[in-house]
Amino acid sequence: MSATAVVPAASAAAPATVVPLQVTGPATSRFNLVVMGDGYTAAELPKFREQLDKHLNILWSIEPFKTYRNYINVYAVEIPSPGSGVDCDPNLTSPKIDTPLQMGFWGGCNPASVQRLLTVSATAAAQYADLVPGTTSANRQILAIGNSDTYGGAGGSYATASGGNALSALITPHELGHSLGGLQDEYDYYARGDRGAAYEGPEPSSIHHTLLTEQQMLAEQKKWFRWLGEPSESGGPIARYEAGMYAGSGVWRPSKHSMMKVLGYYFDQVSRERMTQRISSRATLIQSSTPPGPVARNQLVWLQTLHPASHELTVTWTLDGTTLPTNNQRYVDLAALQLTPATHTLTAKITDPTPFVRDPAVRASPALTTTRTWTITQSSVLTDATPPTFTTSTSTEHPVNASEVVYAETTQSDTHQPPITWQLDNKTIPNPGNDRDLPLAPLNLTGPHTLTATVGTDRLTWQIDGTGPTVTPTLSKPLLKITKPTGPEYIYNDAFTMALKATDDTAGYVVPEFRVDGDGWYNYYGWPTDATAPFKFTAEGTEIDQLVYGKLGVPRVVPWDDVPSGYGRHQLEYRAIDAPGNIAAPNRLAVTLLRPAPTCTTTITGARNGPLTVTTGVTCLTNATINGPVAIREGASLVATDTRINGPVTATKAADLHLLRTTVNGPVTLTGVTRSAVLVGTTVSGPVTAKAATTADPVVLAGNTIKGPLTCSANAAPPTNLQAPNQVTGPRTGQCATL
């Protein structure tokens, strides 16, 4: 698509170039997303386009934007900036930059604001948006992206997001939730690090906040009663969770952590329903039709609708109030009805049957339902012999995914409906009823295919991408990795990292995601402070800018969240969504996180000859070789990692004994260990005995190779192998009989 250079009306404003990135139809009948960059110099405009590509591909991976992508035109307004960057980034003492939109953190450098609030001049933004022909405040949404790596954004009459932060592309849909959907924040704070006071006030007007109980919502049929109990798109069931609207208590929201609370998750169903309504309301369901009013008895009456990417709209035709059997066709041939000479009324009702909407009032609203009426008179119509051609269609400029509904529209005639012939790899596909839409999902396609549509002598061609993206995980070094048919499993005793690399055979940013223990899918963005760094998991999470990231197990969002620690076994799934919209089948891995080994007071590396006796403190053997027996006395601790011990290991009433990826040439005997005992990935040439341990957590014997018997008895809790069986050449007896 060609770019057009234009100059705003105000002579002082910088010239700009309007670049159509996605045009699905006339701006006057579509929802138009107008994206402009600020603080990008002429040399940095390619950087703006690259960041925008990531923002858009992530947006298209999130419902309802994914389904309603065909309703949306996207225009980039490229404005070369005199200065690079934005105002007050990151501090109030940081310099102010000369930029066309006057973008700045701290609400435009306001000491009374918050640092993350990134604002622009509304006047300037509207002025540049007006450069896109056919767009108005009623059919567009302005999104301004700033040249900054600092976390920030804003929602309101316009939406903003920083361009280069690891979380930037997730700020965009959140802020569109505010600006387009009128959704509220579900945070329990306004200023970070300061939990909000209890909510005091009447029932909120917000559709996703309430004072009502679930029973009251059901009884009174209010708020999200229609969704209660549904598995949430963002994890957990739709229910009633306390806090939101910056209040720490006294008000409730529908889900644990939707996008309006935690960036990275999806919109939950309540917010998704609102966003579906708002996107649809900015476009026109009927794009074109036989002009409403009088029509002839031998005329063909037709209409053209919008086209969701996941389903067809429903078109119902009625004649004098009686439904016609039209099989969802987009036309009625009046000549075939053999009408009586009287005047008749023909009505077409267009409805979006999306499952994203359950509220009948929303379904019946003009956003999702509309009608058009014609009066059938006695006159006849002349035959139109104009050869048919295609007018609009699913874009042929990029591949379509294998579950998409591909559409095409044609020029129309008042006497016949030009039929479309669809072919897959040169083989005709039957498409009865509404032949303007072709659902690909029922074809169960895999791999690449070629789809064509023909009307008259005109032809359209699409490449179908039936291959999902590939995701490769890279985890930090574990204590132990084992391979099972269900996927790899890892054991750690400290923080671990996971990087996800997603690749695809088509152009465009690929969106990787993961989820933990079946919770909501979470966007993999690297790490909040570095998009190129892997994601870090810990038992309690890592606090960054007074938010918590990477809490394994039940998420912890703010420091005061009281949730169980992440120690134990967890399942991680990962997948990706490519630019055409294919969602890869998820793969899985399992991780067991043990409590960390005690902190070293003495560390030994290298070789040491002779016996080693640990009497106090915590002695750590790291990449060491001990040529002699090792004894750990009462109250003392030993942690051996990647070490070789040429002799027996005996721990009697020791506090801790950890043998991690270690080789012991001799027996290992644990008697009365009091705090922790962990043997993981260790090879022992001799018997292993664990008895009378009083540890709070079970003795861990996982993935070891034991060349001798394994005996366990009288331990406070039966030892565990963490589902990583040991290889034992001798008998297994007592509490270790199944390990």
Image: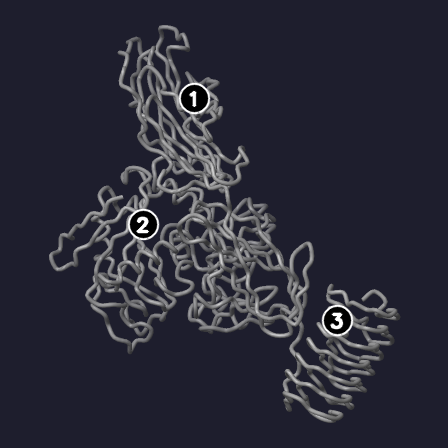
Q: Earlier in the sequence, mark 3 or mark 1?
A: 1
Q: Which quadrant: the C terminus?
A: bottom right
Instruction: Name the residue at 41% across, 10% down.
Output: 336
Q: Earlier in the sequence, mark 2 or mark 3?
A: 2
Q: Residues within 10 Å of mark 2 (few under 14, many from 20)?
A: many
**How far is the residue under mark 1 from the one under mark 2?**
34 Å
Where residue 303 appears, as percent x and y from the top left, is 35, 25
Q: Amino acid at mark 3?
A: Asn
Q: What mark, if any, has residue 141 been given in the picture?
A: 2
How many numbered discs?
Answer: 3
Q: Residues within 10 Å of mark 3 (few under 14, many from 20)?
A: many
Q: Nearer the viewer, mark 2 or mark 3?
A: 3
Where residue 330 appears, as percent x and y from the top left, is 40, 24
Looking at the image, do the residues carrying marks 2 and 3 touch, with CB atoms under 8 Å apart? no
Q: What mark, if any, has residue 452 been given in the picture?
A: none
Of helix, strand and loop, which one carries label 1? strand
Q: Name the one closer to the observer, 583 or 301.
A: 583
Spot the residue most to the left. Answer: 11
Where residue 385 appears, as percent x and y from the top left, is 27, 15
Name the residue tied to disc 3.
704
Instruction: Name the residue at 31% across, 45% down.
Output: 32
Name the residue tied to disc 1.
317
Could you tell whether 1 is left or right of 215 in the image? left
